[in-house]
Image: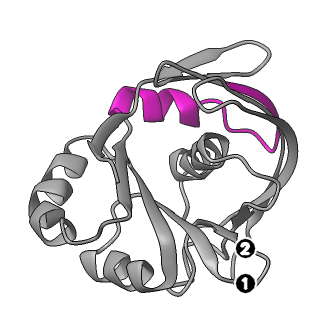
Amino acid sequence: MALKSTIHRLELDVADIDHGNYGSFSLTLARHPSETEERLMMRVLAFALHADPALEFGRGISSEDEPDLWLKDPTGAISLWIDVGLPEERRLRRAAGRAERIVVIAYGGRGVDVWWDKIRETLARLPALTVLAIPCEAGRALAALADRAMRLQCTVQEQQVYVNDAARSVLIEPVVLRAQ
């Protein structure tokens, strides 16, 4: 018998002071049985950093043709492609042919450094690529906020991200590995 995805409901309030972006979002996320809580929360972080009513979650881990999140314009063209984790170079080159902008939210401790050292030079030709690395401790702290029903506040100020629930607060200081 195949395991089913776990549904998570999220009420997310975003105050992105750096970009003047504010909003409240009711989101439903499906967590694939093989997806960790850390990866789930990285998708939430990616949404918060690029919050838009039209931003959508992709079909998930099992889909190679879709990002983790994407933003499409009214014609269906992809204006923003967001992947979390350590995507393959080939996947990012294909995304560059389909989307105006690509963002990678990389996490995983030392694995991020190894991954970035391996693909940095070849990705230099992708003009619309931004890569942010999330420190390992912050990723683990963010994963601890995961729950089936969540109410989170996210504040972005001076390139720092504060994610709070009713009892805990997590400070995330993304490291910009590459900015478009």
Instruction: Inspect the image, locate mark 1, and give the three-letter code of the amino acid beneath it.
Output: Gly
Question: Does the segment drawn in magenta span residue 176?
Answer: no
Q: Quadrant of residue 134?
A: top left
Which residue is labeled 1 in the image?
Answer: 76
Instruction: Work out whether 107 lies above or below 127.
Output: above
Describe residue 152's horizontal placement relative to residue 50 as left or right. Answer: right
Residue occupying the point 66% across, 41% down: 48
Taking the magenta stretch, the answer to whether it contains residue 151 is yes
Q: Quadrant of the N terminus?
A: bottom right
What whole-number distance in Å separates the C-alpha atoms at marks 2 and 1? Answer: 5 Å
Relative to 180, residue 143 above or below: above
Tell me what residue is drawn at x 62 percent, y 15 percent.
Answer: 169
Q: Nearer the viewer, residue 55 or 6?
A: 55
Which span of residues is magenta-colored? 135-154
Residue 73's disc is 2
Q: Quadrant of residue 119?
A: bottom left
Nearer-the-camera pick, 3 or 12:
12
As drawn, is 20 to the left or to the right of 92? right
Tell me: residue 145, above or below residue 130: above
> As drawn, is 88 to the left or to the right of 171?
left
Place of residue 66 in the rendered image (x, y in percent of width and height, measured from the top left)? 57, 80
Element on which disc 1 rests: loop
Q: Secondary structure at mark 2?
A: loop
Label 2 Cα neighbours within 10 Å, binned few <14 / some 14-19 / many ≥20: few
Residue 17's tag is none
Taking the spot 35% from the left edge, 54% from the top edge, the residue there is 180
Circle 2: residue type: Asp
Query: Which residue does the image show at 22% across and 51% down from the upper left?
Result: 111
Quadrant in the rendering for residue 22 = top right
Estimate the x, y position of residue 24 in percent, counting from the top left: 87, 37
Asked if the residue at tag 1 contacts the one at tag 2, i.e. Cβ–Cβ closer than 8 Å, the answer is yes
